[in-house]
Amino acid sequence: MSAYDWLPDFLDRLKADNVLLEDDSITALAKVPMLILEAEDWGRAAAQAQAFGLRWMGGWADQLDEAFHVSACLAHQHEVLVLRAMLSLEIPVLPSHTPWYPGADHMERHTQDMYGVLFSDHPDPRRWTRHHAWGENEYPLRSDFPLAGTRPGPMPTDHNYRYLKAQGAGVYEIPVGPVHAGIIEPGHFRFQAVGEQVLNLEIRLGYVHKGIEKIAVGRDAPGLARLAARISGDSTVAHGWAACMAMEQAAAVQVPERASYLRAIMAERERIANHLGDIGAICNDVAFAFAQYQFSRLRESWQRVSQQVFGHRFMMDCVVPGGVASDVDGAGLELLRSGLEPLRAELVELMAILDDNPSLEDRLATTGFLSAAIAAKFGATGYVGKASGQDIDARRDMRYAPYDRLEVVVPTSQNGDVQARMHIRSQEVFASLDLLTQLLRDIPAGEIRSDWRTASEVEGIAVIDGWRGEIMTYVRFDADDRIARFMPRDPSWFTWPALEQLIHDNIVPDFPVCNKSVNGSYSGHDL
Amino acid sequence: MLKLFNKIRKTGVITEDVPEGRDPAFEEVGEQLRAKVGEIFSGSLAIREVDAGSCNGCELEANALNNSWYSIERFGIHFVASPRHADLLLVTGPVSRHMEAALRRTWDATPNPKLVLAMGDCAADGGEFGVSYASCGGVSSIIPVDGVIRGCPPTPMSLMKAILALVEKRTDND
């Protein structure tokens, strides 16, 4: 199949629906085709895209001189398309994508809070990222908003957010957070329940919003990589890689082969470490402490090797623009190799024990069911999507180096429950061990870092598969090789709303295990 | 079930019995800590962890103290679910402005006398995120801080040492 052979059909559909397309409407963002649309056509384009079967991957805005540029990224199987509309600064209004793509809800409300761009027919006009750190008619990502902000003094709590209410005999409400009982990130969960049964869950995030998109502006490439490495500490390699890949695309920098192998080795190690931790924690949430001891033990040993070989337990700041920060010598590679088979053997043994345990099965099977239809509707990827039939993995689909020369096995399931999300994790660990075997066998000699080339007024977009799911990152450089816009889209944007759905009709005491099985990133989402 | 018990038997107690799993330096810090916790906190130091804006990196390392390599509970230290049960608040992150009120309330809810340990470069001074419309910077800009442990993130070992130093400082002051 030739590249983008579906695009003419899609363009015909748009034209048939009177979406204005002119000769200069079709342009490109780095290597990705981009359609420039009239603002009024924004909603109809989404309707056609949805009917055509395109997947919604993310939306963001940007401010250039005299206009807001609103963009959305869509995927047709393994190919990506960007839609863009330009809006005047005076009347920044356009239709919403949310009626067609429910997963767009929070991202559009984020854009509304950060830029004051209004999505006219958005079904939920409430604020999202904004609590009280800035005012209702102030927009932090606009260029005239001062970095220091406008509201000095102590912050009030976010007490006047309008949560959904439920009424009726025996209905009660349980507010949880932002400070939770465990050692986890902050967010607020509002349950409506009858007896033990959850009628509705509403998730309120934004508590760890720390202005990542704003403080990215003006950074140089290495500075942005450092920031990206701290978007979500558990995904430091993944977000670092996505940001660097987007910058490299923009600046047309080629990454040396050896560097791409080292990046993949780190990314697979990150995936394994997090999956091991999660499998243990899922079991711990149903009081099967044995698994927690075993898997946290394996995770710790694994991280110690990362420390030894890469100098950091999470491999933070190891991915840099143009390549990787430092090389791994023969002894280091051998150490990495020597850890693969022992872990595989332990995992075979442990998963057999987990699968053998009826009380574990009783708590995990059928719990927190997410249908394939709802997973697709919200655009869930990663283990959440894969456990609900979403056969999406950028390593295989987008064919970025070095995965373009490897066979990436993507496990999926139709079961959609907590048990399936746990099993996808263990299957992914086995698949990652296979990938590591290949990567460590085939890693070529050579340079580990290309020189950075000055980027001037260019854009880049990268899609990679992190351990949590697909990450899509957009960057724009200004005229002086500095970042003008940075938007990292963590997969959690689409799995948090999936969590609200999959908890329906479950019992309140099963919420912790359902939440852990999804393990959304708060920091990666709040930005 | 037999497989399960067999696995437990084969794994052994890695914190105590398996020589290659032991880190003598860690054991030493732990024993000092146990002595101090015994002396000052009647054998039990309760820590409430508060993420006030962190990237989750510090949380992973604080959690690691509970794994069987470190098993911090054997030194009398445990993480508790409520600030009302806590002797020490372990605070991470630059304090985001959206967590500012929750952090103050958590501090208010912690009974006196209490200790506050700021964990990580961000908690020290805002770190990579600095001070902005969305970030208050270091923890000491919002609540009184008794100790700071730098690192991005601090390792479990350095976190243990920081807890020990904080507890020792408290003895000196008394």
Image (cartoon, rainbow, N blue to C red):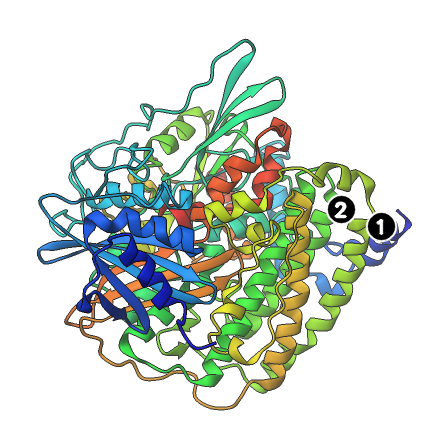
Give the chain of mark 1.
B
Instruction: Residue lying at the far bottom in this picture: please name it.
Output: A446
- State the CA–CA distance, disc 2 to disc 1: 8 Å
For this rendering, which residue is in front, A294 or A383?
A383
Determine if marks 2 and 1 fall on one subunit: no
Number of the label disc, if any, that sits on residue A290: 2
- The answer to the question of whether label 2 and label 1 lie on touching residues, with beta carbons closer than 8 A, is yes
Q: Which of the 4 quarters of the picture holds residue A119? A: top left
Residue A367 shows which numbered tag?
A: none
Q: Amino acid at mark 1?
A: Leu
Q: Quadrant of residue A140?
A: top left
Residue farthest toward the top in the current orientation of the protein: A169
> Which residue is found at the position 69% from the left and 38% from the top?
A366
The answer to whether residue A267 is left or right of residue A124 is right
Residue beneath label 1, please? B4
Q: Is residue B24 visible?
A: no
Dot 2 falls on a residue whose secondary structure is: helix
Residue A410 horizontal/vertical position (percent): 61, 64
In the picture as drawn, the residue positioned furthest to the right comes out as: B2
**Residue that appears at 16% across and 39% down:** A138
Check disc 2: other Cα within 10 Å, few if <14, some if 14-19, many if 20+. Answer: some
Q: Residue at x 47, y 13 (%)?
A: A167
Horizontal relation, residue A439 to residue A242: left or right: right
Tell me the chain of label 2. A
Q: Measured along the vertical axis of the image, is residue B60 above or below residue A135?
A: below
Q: Is residue A437 left or right of residue A496?
A: right
- Residue A193 in percent (x, y) is at 55, 21
Task: List x then y, in percent, for residue A438.
Answer: 63, 79
Residue A243 appears at what percent x and percent y? 36, 66
